[in-house]
Image (tube, rainbow, N blue to C red):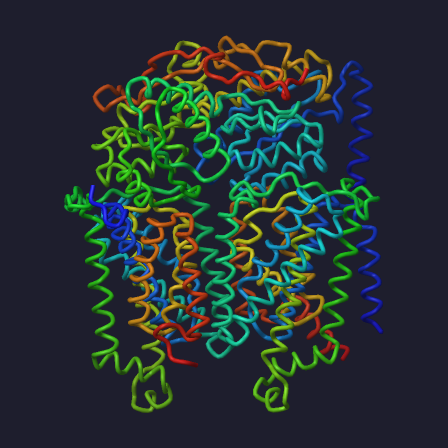
Amino acid sequence: MKINKLYLVLLLLALVAPFFLYPVFLAKLLCFALFACAFNLMLGYVGLLSFGHAAFLGTGGYVTGWLMMNSGLTPELAILLGTLTAGALGALYGKLSVKREGIYFAMVTLALSQLVFFIYLQAPFTGGEDGMQGVPRGKLFGVIDLSDNISMYYFVLAIFLFGFWLIHRTVHSPFGQVLKAIRENEPRATSLGYNVNDYKWVAFTISAALAGLAGSTKTLVFQLASLTDVHWHMSGEVVLMTLVGGVGTILGPVVGAGVIVTMQNYLSSGELGNYLHIIMGLIFVICVLAFRSGIVGELQKVWKRNFG
Amino acid sequence: MKMMKKTLLAASVAALASSAAMADISDGKLKIGVLADMGGVYADICGQGCVTATEMAVEDFGGKVLGMPIEVISADDQLKPDVGSAIVRKWVEDEQVDVVGGLVSSAVVGAATKVLTDAKKIALISTAASNAFTTKQCSPYNVHWTYNVAALANGTVQPMVDAGNKKWFFITADYAFGHALEDVATKVIKENGGEVVGVARAPLSTTDFSSYILQAQSSGADVVALANAGNDTVNALKAASEFGLTEMMSVAGLLVFTPNAQAMDPNVAGGMRTTTGFYWDLDEQTREWSKRFMERHGSIPAMGHAGAYSMTMHYLKAVEAAGTDDSDAVIKKMKEMKPDDFFSRNATLRADGRMVHDMYYVEIKKPEERRDGDDIFKVLSVIPGDKAYAPILPECNFK
Amino acid sequence: MATFLGINLFGLFGQLLVGLINGSFYALLSLGLAIIFGLLKIINFAQGAMYMLGAFSAWLALSYLGINYWAALILVPLAVGFVGVLMERFLIRPIANEDHLYSLLLTFGLALMVQGFFTHVYGSSGQSYAIPEALRGGTKLPFMYLPDYRAWIILASVVVCGLTWWMIEKTKLGAYLRAGTENPQLMQAFGINVPLIVTLTFGFGVGLAGLAGVMAAPIYSVSPDMGSNLLIVVFAIVVIGGMGSIGGAILTGLGMGVIEGLTKYFYPEASNTVIFLVMVIVLLLKPAGLFGKEA
């Protein structure tokens, strides 16, 4: 039960962190960690690389932002609806894409997300290049004022824990076992009588909904939804986070998101800001050439070699 | 760790503050953040140059206010509203920044001023053009210095419509600034008996304007108005000349900054008219400051650079006069005191945060008129501030 | 002004022609992608960056070495192709036996680095490259003024695309290439150096992007992000045409340019979206693409 102890320590750290670090930064980190976990559900457990997950992040963000500004809903309901919309979009896209494999799947998801990008660029409600500005954070359940950064952080933490728990449950359920079977040997899973495409489709929908949840929450934290969240660079960034942390490990995406977001945070304000993209590209290349298991994957290997 | 640093800092500050008892600066330091476009299409207009201009103002002021040091920090907004607003949020919530200057792209400034107003911090806007900051999105903490779209449209469009150019076609930058400029200009055109025959909206940083130019060509307009800025204007004009548009109809650059005018082919751009809030070669005073700026920055100042200097100076004077860096007290002083320097002529800072000052209707010089590469504009007339800027709105009358 | 059924024909033809010019670039870039994909099963995400590299090299060659446009047209694609050869030999080959997704990610990383480097050194605002002396001016067509340089682009790109297609589909060299993809072991047994062929083909595909870059330099401003914006459109075109189909890539590239031009005339707001819409429709009706074989 070493794993449970590790989780407990991490949870404690997360609970006290806002008293030592800037809460908005921590909340951003959690949002991206959730986004990367959602993405990893597809890449790590189904073996499909989606290059269009930004579409779901952005959709969640825009829907929640619009609802907060125009409907008078409380934040938790706005986030719920944002998540559901992203999930519905995911279900639609899944229908179009899960039949394709490998590189074809990556290309199709990329192109579909680009379609979403241009729709948001043109649609009047998103504010186009200006972004959706001044989204109110509102009062949680109509009671707790989220404009306080510390309250906002704990709300984000709760959402993250829920998302993380859901992914953990999915992966370890019978459903998750079938997914892994598909990843390892698809023809065999088919011959065992599983409808492979249906399983992939459900996984894609869950992944999209959780990416939408991350986007919805992020919009609330920054009080802004913008095209950056739907741009294909964002789809690339989440691949990088997962790759750095460790594809197919449950904690990998969290670690990867932590590394990348922290790096962006410190580089963007310093002298090295100009080098950000060069460094990110370099990390990509190094990971692919030398560390394909990522930080958590490599650590697991070391652990197994020495203690396993 | 960070917490400890803060406590230590606070303790040492307290010690300092007791020695300089009269100072009422919140954390022993006045911190100015400059948010600008360091590498994008507006980098030459208000990028590192705006940081330099702000630093010059701080140095000229003596580097200290109320006995406390002044620090200038800067960041790149990458022209993205999300990046800009996140930086400003971090500055005011985590890094004790007292005032934010620079502020270039209207999209970024819209997002940034919302954060600043929530935090009750002053936004000193030098280069953004949208008039929204003192109208639709007005706030008691917004100060809009150099120019805005109303001044550009009133300055450039009216004389051209009066001269008989009735049919207009717009090539508009597809975001807050372009829309605002197009709206105001359309109003001026209609009020003076002209009409708008077509609009093409091009995304920010478009490289190939050819299809928009073709639309303009088949519209039958008298004037093609470029409601964009920076390199977009340069590229649009390039395509216009390539497709022979400049020989068929006249082109009006509604917003032409000096660095962009320098980048244009003088054979094509010569004779084009526009409105500006500043030109380096107006008189002795502007030449003196511009020379100092040029020595440090390497090129002649654009209007946003001069504006950044002027507004920082006025802010610092107001802090000194108010005896505190508290935003409410400072903004009150800023609006009471009349800005007056080489940039701000016949100027007042109105209750809505709009700085009203003399504007200049200019023509881009033809190749044969130019002394050298820095000799770009010929001033045709001075537009008094109250003619150029729209009147104050009742809902934005912050006292 | 000529109108037909209420349509302004002059405006329409103009937009179609501009569409065809854009289509020429699409065709060159998607051709390069299709060649690389067909032989190596690699999606080269750095193709856009190589296009940008081509444009920048032309600009640098002119500004610092005085190499003019016509020389650049030959030298730059060779140089960019050589970069491609190095890329294949030292970065892609070591992971050739891994999942092809890793090579996609590798080239994505490379693209970020190259773009980041040029942004860092030259800023993102773009450099301008003058149109070569011989191609300034233009022709007055009945429906529009066609600048000579734009006419040259269409001509050059159609010739290059046509030659490439002929070389791969109709010559002995092309036959080796295709056979090398189908059955590398057999070809190796026949004494043909397959790894060398693979490397050279990758270099050729990348060189095409470099050539497109040189051709684009005088009309688009030479900026670090010029490739990344175009690349995504080109990906969609490759998907529509059917991945790996050489002729499909060329025809779809030109065709999509024309469709984009039409959209710009009838409903400009959708001009950026239309290619992706076409892609969705094609995927629904013919999942392997218009000219692709069902996998």
In this image, C143 relative to C229: left or right? left
B171 in relation to B382, above or below: below
Residue at position x 61%, y 83% from top?
A195
Is residue B251 or residue B123 the one in the foreground?
Answer: B251
Q: Quadrant of residue B270?
A: top left
Residue B291 appears anywhere in the view: no
Report how many numbered discs are placed on residues in the image. 0
B197 in relation to A232, above or below: above
Residue C233 appears anywhere in the view: yes
Q: Quadrant of residue B181?
A: top left
Q: Position of residue A44 (x, y in %)?
A: 63, 72
Residue at position x 47%, y 56% from top?
C113
Residue at position x 51%, y 24% from top?
B53
C20 in relation to B79, above or below: below
In this image, A274 relative to C245: left or right? right
Is residue C174 or residue B351 the one in the foreground?
Answer: B351
Q: Position of residue B256 (x, y in %)?
A: 38, 27
Q: Position of residue B176 (x, y in %)?
A: 51, 35
Residue sitting at the far front: C5
Location of the N terminus of chain A (image quadrant) = bottom right
Q: Position of residue B132 (x, y in %)?
A: 55, 28
Is residue B313 or residue B396 the one in the foreground?
Answer: B396
In this image, B302 relative to C255: left or right? right
Location of the C terminus of chain A (image quadrant) = bottom right
A109 in relation to B91, above or below: below
